[in-house]
Amino acid sequence: MDKTTLTAPASDTQQEALIQGIQQGLDAVETRFKIDPEGCMREAREALKLAETVEPGTWRARCWNAMGIACGAGGDYPAAITWFRKAIEYFEAADDIEHLIPSLANLCHILTFAEQFAEALHTGLGALDLVQNTDEQNLAPAVRRKQLFTLYNHICGIYGHLGDFTTALTYAQRVAELIDEKDLVAVAKNYDQFAALHGNLGDLDAAVEYGRKAWDVMAAFNNPYDKGVIAGNLGHIYLALFREDGSQNTLAEAIDYARQALDNFRAAGAPNRELVAMLSLGWIYLDAGNFAQAIRQLRPAIELAEKLGKHNTFARACFGMARACRLLGRLPEAEAYLRRGEDIVAEMRQDALESRLDLLLEKYQLYKQRGDVKNALICHESYTALYQEKLNAEQRKFAAEMKVRFDVERAQRERAIAQKDKELFKQQSRQLQQEVELKTKRITLTGLLLGQRNEILTKIKREALANAKNPSAVHECLQNIAGLVSEHLDSAEAWETFNAEFELLHHDFISKLSRRYPLLTGVELKLCALITINLSSKEIARLLCISSRSIETYRYRIRKKLGLSRQDNLTALLAAL
């Protein structure tokens, strides 16, 4: 084989340089995907090329995740889902929890954009369970907090899309609880989250309050993209409020915030969001009856939408222009914009229902203003039929969303039951383990004491047998036996043996007890030790070869030295040590 075709392994220095290049690409994707989708795609592809030559494979999987982010930012949701799943498969096989959870969170987020809400919620809640059930050894507290924050945000968004704004508010509150008060940008975003949810719940006063808080906090930062998001939401909230109260002051606020959104998105270099803000401002002017200003916003919106290939937005801007021109009496212009919008709608295969409704409504109004009753009636009938189709679609969507919510609630109940069973099993296992440990200690110490007792009984037996045939020595024998018993009870060697064994099983118990209560004798300390392993007075008496009455006397003395009243529990106090 020609040696020139062989690829030499990269040196350590080359490996470090490659990894550095990959990391730079990953960082670029993470920081700029919102405002530069095309640039992020280039960075992700370049990083993936480098990762193909680097070990371990974790770098490739991280680049697959970055490809998913870039595809999602560019609106290619199927490709994004494929890349995320590929990364997840690798991280699961490698048991790489640290990188697995962010990939699951990204998949959850992109599934939401793809309107696959059931799978998005299943993925998000599954990732949440994984975070909550992973110990600190595999997931550092700071990383856990960050991932919980991300997942709570995503799950909040899913419930918002499903129309369950109350549950979404619950998750928004969980997000708030994780935010560091010093992280003012995160605080502002959370306020904006509350504003949007309260707005959807119809509580516009609370929505305005939270939106203004978000805007006031964010005002101190040079962060035009996030400022644009907050201003845009406030513009929508004030527009909804204007439609309720008709106040010119409210309308002025709506226009002002919509302009702020547009200016900030331009400053951020985010053309997609700039286009949305431009369209929103144009439609606010239409609602306000300021048709000249509406045209000033909608005309460049049409140009930008065409440039970016945003068909839906292009059609809506054309229909807005048609309305403004018609209401200004410029009917030929209105008809021309309607035709441009109609051509685009004809090319659209998906998500064209709203645009078709807008088209028919504007055509109906145009024919009606011209006095063309026949065509106006045709458009009206078509509009009514299509609107009914929309209602049917919404009913089907609502039914599907309710099923998703039902399935999710059922899954949550099942997870809660499983978790409860798991915790109960753990608790029972701990109790059983404690019982086993206690019984093991009792057996060990009881065996030790029985051994010591058997030793003294053997000596007594030998003494008795030695003097059995000598009646005159009975008195001396009894004295010797009494001495042996006393020696057993007061034996320093036996006590030291017992103490050493007990200290191994109950770390420092006797040492702590003797330091805290120095007046306790050796026998009293031994008695305390036996009480600790739940031996009864009768069992202790048998082990120590003394009467139960003597044990009760010892217990009385111990209680007195420990300063216990009649109501105090000796066993509980000793257990606490």
Image: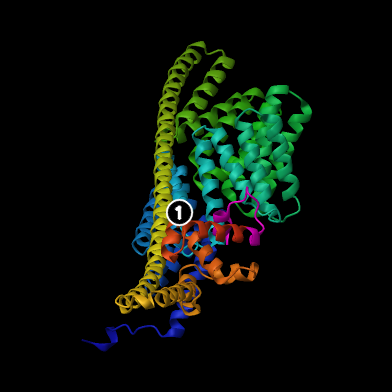
Answer with left or right where residue 439 lies relative to residue 175.
Answer: left
Position of the N terminus by quadrant: bottom left
Single out the residue that lies furthest toward the front.
472
101 or 509: nearer the viewer: 509
| Drawn side of residue 435 relative to residue 212, left or right | left
Which residue is most to the bottom?
Answer: 3
x and y percentages locating residue 323 in the rendered image:
60, 26
* Residue 115, x across and y down, in percent: 44, 39
| 576 in magenta | yes
Q: Nearer the viewer, residue 482 or 422?
A: 482
Percent position (x, y) of residue 457?
Answer: 36, 72
Q: Residue at x 61, y 60 (%)?
A: 557
Quarter of image, res 232: top right
Which residues are the magenta region?
Answer: 560-577
Q: Quadrant of residue 212?
A: top right
Question: Quarter of the image holding residue 386?
Answer: top left
* Colouring scheme applied when the structure was drawn: rainbow
Q: Residue at x 47, y 70 (%)?
A: 502
Q: Is residue 166 above or below residue 34?
A: above
164 in relation to 70, above or below? above
Q: Where residue 216 appears, x then y in whole percent?
A: 76, 46
* Image position of 244 (left or right of 352): right
Residue named by callout 1: 133
Residue 574 visible in the displayed image: yes
Q: What's the residue at 64%, 59% (across, down)?
A: 560
Residue 93 included in the magenta stretch of the image: no
Residue type, numbered disc 1: Asn
Q: Count the labels in the image.
A: 1
**In-image side of 455 versus 224 (left or right):** left
User: 129 or 100, which lies in front?
Assistant: 129
Q: Secondary structure at mark 1?
A: loop
Q: Is residue 31 visible?
A: no
